């Protein structure tokens, strides 16, 4: 079992930045690739970014490429999502998830992830 807790969300003006964190507990963190997804009201869950076990590989959704960065610190059991140049359309609940495999460009497949956090709200005002 892996327990994931996100933090770092909040209300920010368009153009602003946030750093989301997801702390994992339970099984060995480095044995899981990690992903970030988001879900806006009335919309389907959307893949944002993923990172491999050691952090050597990442995959970023085209919709946020160049603005969002994913990283991890295995010593701290934490994965981060740096979100910059925020737009109102980035408003959503952001979730982290853990997968026992690294799927590279197929990281957008939500069923690959076994564990999910409760989410952190990001609201971007115009």
Image (tube, rainbow, N blue to C red):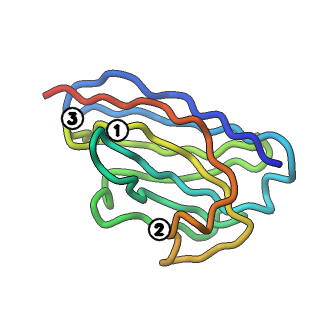
Who comes first in sequence, dot 1 or dot 2? 1
Between marks 2 and 3, how big is the CA–CA gap? 26 Å
User: What is the crowding at mark 1: few (fewer than 14 residues within 10 Å), some, or many (at least 20)?
Assistant: many
* Quadrant assignment for the C terminus: top left
Q: Nearer the viewer, residue 87 or 92?
A: 92
Give the mark nearest the N terminus, 2 or 3: 3
Question: Percent position (x, y) of residue 8?
Answer: 50, 28
- Whether pointer 2 and pointer 3 mark residues with C-beta atoms closer than 8 Å, the reply is no
Tell me the residue at 68%/63% (across/down).
Answer: 99
Q: Residue furthest top?
A: 11
| Above or below: residue 8 compared with residue 76 | above
Q: Is residue 84 above or below residue 63?
A: above
Whole-percent x and y of residue 14? 19, 32
Find residue 108 and name its label: 2
| Residues at marks 1 and 2, CA–CA distance in whole angstroms | 17 Å
Task: Name the residue beneath numbered marker 3.
Answer: 15
Q: Residues within 10 Å of mark 3 (few under 14, many from 20)?
A: some
Name the residue beneath numbered marker 1: 92
* Circle 3: element type: loop
Residue placed at 50% from the left, 77% from the top? 106
Residue lying furthest left: 126
**Horizontal placement of 108 versus 67: left or right?**
right
CA gap, disc 1 to disc 3?
A: 16 Å
């Amino acid at each position: 079992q892996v327990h994931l807790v996100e933090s770092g969300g909040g209300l920010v003006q368009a153009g602003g930045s946030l750093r989301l964190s997801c702390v994992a507990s339970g099984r060995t963190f480095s044995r899981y690739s990690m992903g970030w997804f988001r879900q806006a009201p009335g919309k389907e869950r959307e893949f944002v970014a993923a990172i491999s076990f050691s952090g050597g590989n990442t995959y970023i959704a085209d919709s946020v490429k160049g603005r969002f960065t994913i990283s991890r610190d295995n010593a701290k059991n934490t994965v981060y999502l740096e979100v910059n140049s925020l737009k109102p359309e980035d408003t959503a609940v952001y979730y982290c998830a853990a997968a026992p495999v690294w799927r590279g460009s197929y990281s957008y497949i939500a069923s690959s992830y076994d564990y999910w956090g409760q989410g952190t709200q990001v609201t971007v005002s115009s």
